[in-house]
Image (cartoon, rainbow, N blue to C red):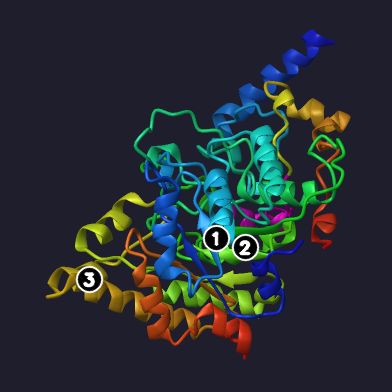
């Protein structure tokens, strides 16, 4: 199974690399972030823009680059589906999935597995 | 046990938090020297975590020292320098030392500091760190391994009303409330209209009822200081007009104080403000002076007679 999985990963990167700058995190959330890859943010933030965005909308780390999250927020509003997903609390990145195909992880449900101690937002609201 | 800050925030009492200046070689003596002039007014002090990407004494060590000096710390934890294991370890270490208030933040990038060649971590982001702190409170590490007895935290965070995308900032603040934050210290904002817009949106969406909002005001002293904030601190936009005011003033320090007073009064006039966070680099007498000018009674008086946070109308 390893060779086919690697082949799918290569195919995925061949498509998503040029279009979205895919970093092969193996747990794709593009649809929740306005089809803008949060892993292209220099801080790899998955829950919105940091507080360092410059007044002209460029990145704190790379002044020549427009903030990834500025694009994500704008584009998410134009999507017919998933518009509200941008407000979801996304769990920490699972670094063991890096390099693998997020398509396969989506099919197997592996990309939705969170650490046992990662509570739901509702749990977190309890006093 | 709940912290005094937590108790006051829950009771909707007005609070004043302040930034403890960074500690390098001066040790405990420095901490006591900084505390003395502001202690009568301040409820809790931020022990900063390598602010603007510059290394200083750790926020955990400064928080412990603050407690030894009889002051209540708010331990900042930034995601820039630690992976999730180190963040969990520092939170548990803080709990062991009786540190309850923690402020969870993504953190400025290493490129803002004087060691830009350092590796940036960002294993978690700010909202995830808030959720992690609340997970520990529920009695387990991220792996699910139990913690008995579980620690207690009053979890805070930060948000920047003055950075784009402006209209999204309140939603990001709401995400932090959803993750479990009790209070938000807002980044210093030299554009009162942006702060106003944020606070009004927070009020209209009911956010300020779910999470205590503390706007920050910075008391500067010199044109150079203002230029430093404008150019070196990520996410703070200082209007040219404010810079000009200080440049042209006969007494730059007095003009800086006047600007701080104007910004603070404006912030206090907005709906749903739970208190103020005050920052004065190195000259901490400014914090007490600003509180007096704003008519904020000393802490002892507030505790005795009560002083409610502004009630949203």
Residue at mark 1: chain: B
Q: Which residues are magenta?
A: A72-90
Residue under the image location 69 percent in, 52 percent down? B98
Residue that badge 2 annotates: B173
Q: CA distance from mark 2 to mark 1?
A: 6 Å
Residue at mark 2: chain: B
Residue B66 image point, x, y percent? 54, 55
Q: Is residue B76 above or below residue B41?
A: above
What secondary structure is marked by label 2?
Answer: helix
Q: Is residue B148 magenta?
A: no
Q: Quadrant of the C terminus of chain B?
A: bottom right
Q: Are marks 2 and 1 in contact (CB under 8 Å)?
A: yes
What secondary structure is marked by label 1?
Answer: strand
Disc 3: CA contacts within 10 A as few (<14), some (14-19) or many (>=20): some
Q: Is residue B288 left or right of residue A85?
A: left
Q: In terms of secondary structure, what is the magenta stretch mainly?
A: helix
Mark identifier at residue B159: 1
Residue that badge 3 annotates: B253
Q: Is residue B45 visible?
A: yes
Q: CA distance from mark 2 to mark 3?
A: 33 Å
Residue under the image location 20 percent in, 63 percent down? B223
The foreground one among B238 and B156 is B156
């Amino acid at each position: 199974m390893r060779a086919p999985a690697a082949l799918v990963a290569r195919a995925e990167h061949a498509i998503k690399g040029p279009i979205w700058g895919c970093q092969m995190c193996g747990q794709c959330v593009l649809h929740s972030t306005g089809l803008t890859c949060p892993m292209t943010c220099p801080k790899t933030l998955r829950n919105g823009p940091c507080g360092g965005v410059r007044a002209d909308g460029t990145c704190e780390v790379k002044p020549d680059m427009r903030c990834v999250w500025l694009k994500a927020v704008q584009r998410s509003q134009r999507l017919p589906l998933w518009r509200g997903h941008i407000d979801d609390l996304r769990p920490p990145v699972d670094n063991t999935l890096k390099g693998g195909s997020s398509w396969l992880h989506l099919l197997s449900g592996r990309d939705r597995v969170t650490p046992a101690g990662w509570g739901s937002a509702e749990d977190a609201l309890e006093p | 046990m709940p912290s005094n800050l937590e108790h006051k925030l829950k009771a909707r009492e007005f609070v004043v938090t302040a930034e403890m200046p960074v500690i390098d070689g001066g040790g405990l003596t420095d901490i006591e020297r900084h505390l003395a002039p502001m202690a009568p007014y301040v409820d809790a002090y931020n022990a900063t975590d390598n602010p603007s990407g510059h290394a200083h004494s750790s926020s955990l060590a400064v928080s412990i020292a603050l407690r030894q000096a009889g002051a209540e710390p708010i331990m900042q934890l930034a995601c820039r320098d630690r992976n999730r294991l180190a963040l969990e370890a520092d939170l548990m270490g803080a709990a062991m030392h009786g540190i309850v208030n923690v402020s969870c933040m993504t953190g400025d990038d290493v490129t803002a500091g004087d060691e830009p060649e350092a590796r940036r971590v960002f294993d978690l982001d700010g909202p995830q760190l808030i959720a992690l702190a609340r997970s520990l409170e529920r009695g387990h590490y991220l792996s699910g391994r139990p913690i008995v007895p579980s620690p207690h935290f009053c979890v805070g965070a930060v948000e920047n009303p003055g950075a784009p995308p402006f209209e999204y900032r309140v939603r990001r603040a709401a995400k932090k409330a959803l993750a479990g934050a009790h209070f938000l210290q807002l980044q210093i904002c030299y554009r009162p209209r942006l702060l106003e817009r944020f606070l009004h949106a927070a009020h209209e969406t009911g956010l300020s009822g779910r999470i205590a909002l503390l706007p920050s005001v910075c008391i500067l002293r010199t044109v150079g200081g203002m230029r430093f904030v404008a150019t070196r601190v990520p996410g703070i936009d200082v209007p040219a007009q404010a810079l000009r005011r200080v440049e042209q003033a006969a007494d730059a320090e007095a003009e800086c104080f006047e600007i701080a007073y104007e910004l603070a009064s404006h912030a206090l006039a907005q709906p749903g403000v739970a208190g103020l966070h005050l920052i004065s680099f190195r000259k901490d007498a400014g914090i007490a002076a600003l509180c007096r000018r704003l008519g904020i009674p000393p802490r002892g008086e507030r505790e005795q007679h009560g002083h409610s946070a502004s009630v949203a109308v």
